[in-house]
Image (spheres, rainbow, N blue to C red):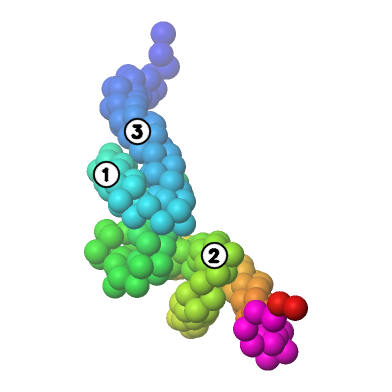
Amino acid sequence: MAAAGGRGDELADLRSSLLAGLDAAHAAREAGLAACRRVVRGSGSAIRAVHRLDPERAGRLRSEAEAALREAQEALAPFPAVAYAGFLHDAAKEYAEACLTAALVTGDPLPGPDALDVPVAAWLGGLAEAASELRRHVLDRLRAGELARGEQLLGVMDDAYEFLVGIDYPDALTGGLRRTVDALRAVLERTRGDVTTTVLQTRLQHTIEAGLDERRPDGPPTAR
């Protein structure tokens, strides 16, 4: 028999409503996690398609990643505590990175946070990661002999870094941006070194070839 003044009946009545709320939050979390995983996979594949100079595939993959992100956002909207657990932010950042990488490579206008419907912190992190991704594109262009294009992309990386290093707010507001920008600086300096080395080697090669051309006799040798 329950003690007089006990709360057993009251707690039993509350139990069903509490568990219903937790069940709904758990279901939203599971749906959001699955959708966010698709965002991350699609965004990564879209970036690789950009590097492979396949804009059609890259655009299709970004569209799929966006659809998955909207699905996650909708599922988690009624549950802010779950939405701010971190994985939705990471997915939004990956999607922003995919979109910004494409824009940085093609020279198209950069879509802002409102255009992508992502938080500012996710957009800033995405820009930093996108600028780092340009290193691969720079090296690909250098290997293809496109030196001017490589130098141009290095300038784009530099512009992104200069913008981001001026965002001086606490990490709680920027999602740990400072660490990402520090990593970008290291990537930028390595890339600058690679471009500089390639420029100097190319100049030396041209100088040697010009010298050989000057020493080479005009016309074919005369037969005796």
Splitting the image into 4 quarters, where does residue 220 fall? Answer: bottom right
Q: Is residue 157 above or below residue 57?
A: below
Q: At 34% from the left edge and 47% from the top edge, which residue is drawn?
A: 57
Q: How far apart are marks 2 and 3 (CA)?
A: 43 Å
In the rendered structure, are the residues bearing label 2 and label 1 in contact, judged by CB atoms less than 8 Å apart? no
Q: At 41% from the left edge and 8% from the top edge, which residue is drawn?
A: 1
Residue at numbered disc 2: 144
Q: Could one spot residue 128 in this view of the protein?
A: no
Left/right of residue 126 with respect to residue 189 in the rendered view: left
Task: Say which amino acid is labelled 1.
Answer: Ala
**Mark 2 against mark 1, which lies toward the viewer?**
2
Q: Residue 186 location, x and y as percent?
A: 65, 72
The mark that comes first in sequence, 3 or 1, is 3
Few, some or many residues within 10 Å of mark 1 (<14, 14–19, 20+):
some
The furthest residue to the front: 224
The quarter of the picture where the C terminus appears is: bottom right
Residue at numbered disc 1: 67
Q: At 30% from the left edge and 51% from the top edge, which residue is drawn?
A: 56
